[in-house]
Amino acid sequence: MRYTRITVNTNQMGGVPCLRGLRIPVATVVDMVADGMSFDEILKAYPDLQQEDIREALRYAAEAVRERELPLVKVA
C-alpha cells in the first residue's frame, strides 16, 4: 500500500511518521481516535488536517500492527 499523506523526515519530529510534512505525528491522531474523539473534534484541534489525513493515519497504524507480533495477555 502506498501512503501519500504520511511523511518521514529525520530532521523533523525525530523522524517519526507525520501527516503531510506537518508536525503532527500519526501516533497523536491515532491516540485521539482511540480516546473516542470524533473526526470533527480532531479537525477542530488540528485545523491543518483533513479527514483523509485521519483515515490514512488509521490505515498506516493498522498496517504497522499487522507487520508485528505483540505480546498479549493470555485469557484464562
Image (tube, grey):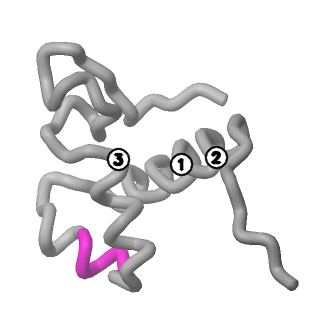
Q: Position of residue 39 (x, y in %)?
A: 35, 75
| Residue denoted by label 1 | 61
Residue 35, labelled with which disc?
none
Closer to the chain start, of discs 1 and 3, is 3
Name the kind of residue labelled 1 in the image.
Answer: Ala
Name the kind of residue labelled 3 in the image.
Answer: Val
The quadrant in which residue 40 appears is bottom left
SS label for mark 3:
helix
| Residue denoted by label 3 | 26
Q: Which residue range is magenta in the image?
A: 38-42
The 10 Å Cα crowd at callout 2, few under 14, some 14 to 19, many 20 or more, is: few
Q: Do the CB atoms of the residues marked 1 and 2 lie less than 8 Å apart?
A: yes
Q: CA distance from mark 1 to mark 2?
A: 6 Å
Identify the residue at image location x=29%, y=31%.
16
Single out the mark in the foreground, 3 or 2. Answer: 2
Q: Nearer the viewer, residue 26 or 42?
A: 26
Q: Position of residue 41 (x, y in %)?
A: 24, 80
| Residue denoted by label 2 | 65
Residue 40: say if magenta: yes
Identify the residue at image location x=23%, y=54%.
49
Closer to the chain start, of discs 3 and 2, is 3
